[in-house]
Image: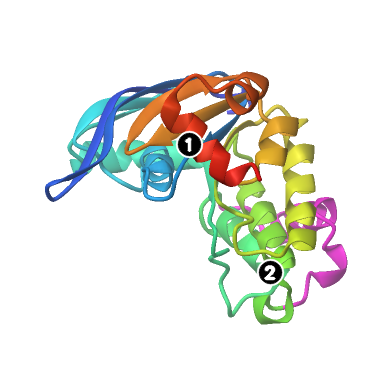
């Protein structure tokens, strides 16, 4: 599964109780595209990512990730297909979610050994190569508590890459970091873009969206209200709701 993957969302609806979180979302992401998903808090961006990765069931519509299709309703078939999707698509969270009892290298090695069944030496070699790529080979033996927030997030990126994904979903992965550490993480993502990965990023980093994204998608109250190149969406937004949102963040 080394080919880049496309992601297609059709008529996606997600409800929690009486509240509609995602409302008829339609979205096609081409292989190798980098898409910045922006919008006000509570608009459904993180929920959309979790649906794309099979971590969250949904009430209507369907999602195709590469050759795999997730259908509404959950159940055994959804769970089985979701496991296949997660072999193709890595996810990186805002709060790192590293295993505190494992070193940086141990965190990166864990999934390749347990899920892919790689021998220890091969998993270790891959882990060290990835830590070197994110600039942390010298911190391989450090535990998460001994790392800065930016370093922990770079370990989380290396851990996701250890499964050789063809797409990465990033959920506000710089929001808990100070400006200098944000730069470290965003530089790694810009480098990964060169690998031809399909990247979908929930972000409030408009500068990164402008420089590195191929498209910017605006999600408001569970609905896509704008979708286009960064220069169009960020500099010449067409909808009043996008205009209001950007007037608050582009200051």
Q: Please indicate whether residue 74 sits to the left or right of residue 90 in the image.
A: left
Quarter-of-image position of residue 231: top right
Is residue 134 a member of the stretch shown in magenta?
yes
In the rendered image, which quarter contains the C terminus? Answer: top right
Residue farthest along the right direction in this orientation: 138
Within 10 Å of disc 1 (Cα), the crowding (few <14, some 14-19, many 20+) is few
Q: Looking at the image, can residue 203 be seen?
A: no
Quarter-of-image position of residue 134: bottom right
**Residue closest to the eye, 85 or 51:** 51
Name the secondary structure under disc 1.
Answer: helix
What color scheme is it?
A: rainbow
Q: Looking at the image, can residue 79 be seen?
A: yes
Within 10 Å of disc 2 (Cα), the crowding (few <14, some 14-19, many 20+) is many
Mark with earlier residue (1, 2): 2
- Give the residues drawn in magenta, as a range: 117-142
Residue picked out by circle 2: 149
Mark number for residue 244? 1
């Amino acid at each position: 599964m080394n080919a880049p993957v496309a992601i297609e969302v059709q008529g996606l609806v997600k409800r929690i109780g009486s509240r509609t979180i995602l409302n008829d979302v339609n979205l096609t992401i081409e292989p190798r595209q980098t898409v910045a998903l922006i919008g006000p808090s509570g608009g459904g961006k993180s929920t959309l990512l979790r649906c794309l990765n099979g971590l969250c069931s949904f009430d209507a519509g369907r999602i195709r990730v590469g050759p795999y299709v997730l259908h509404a309703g959950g159940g055994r078939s959804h769970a089985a297909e979701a496991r296949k999707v997660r072999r193709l698509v890595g996810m990186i969270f805002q709060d790192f979610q590293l295993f505190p009892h494992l070193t940086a290298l141990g965190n990166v090695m864990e999934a390749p050994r347990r899920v892919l069944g790689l021998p220890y030496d091969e998993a270790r070699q891959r882990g060290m190569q990835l830590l070197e790529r994110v600039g942390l080979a010298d911190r391989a033996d450090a535990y998460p508590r001994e790392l800065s927030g930016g370093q922990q997030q770079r370990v989380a990126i290396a851990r996701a890459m250890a499964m050789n994904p063809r797409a990465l979903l990033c959920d506000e992965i710089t929001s808990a970091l100070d400006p200098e550490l944000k730069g470290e993480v965003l530089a790694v993502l810009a480098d990964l873009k060169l690998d031809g990965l399909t990247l979908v990023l929930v972000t409030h980093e408009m500068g990164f969206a402008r420089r590195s994204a191929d498209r910017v998608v605006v999600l408001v109250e569970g609905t896509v209200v704008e979708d286009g190149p960064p220069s169009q969406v960020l500099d010449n937004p067409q909808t009043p709701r996008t205009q209001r949102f950007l007037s608050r963040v582009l200051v």
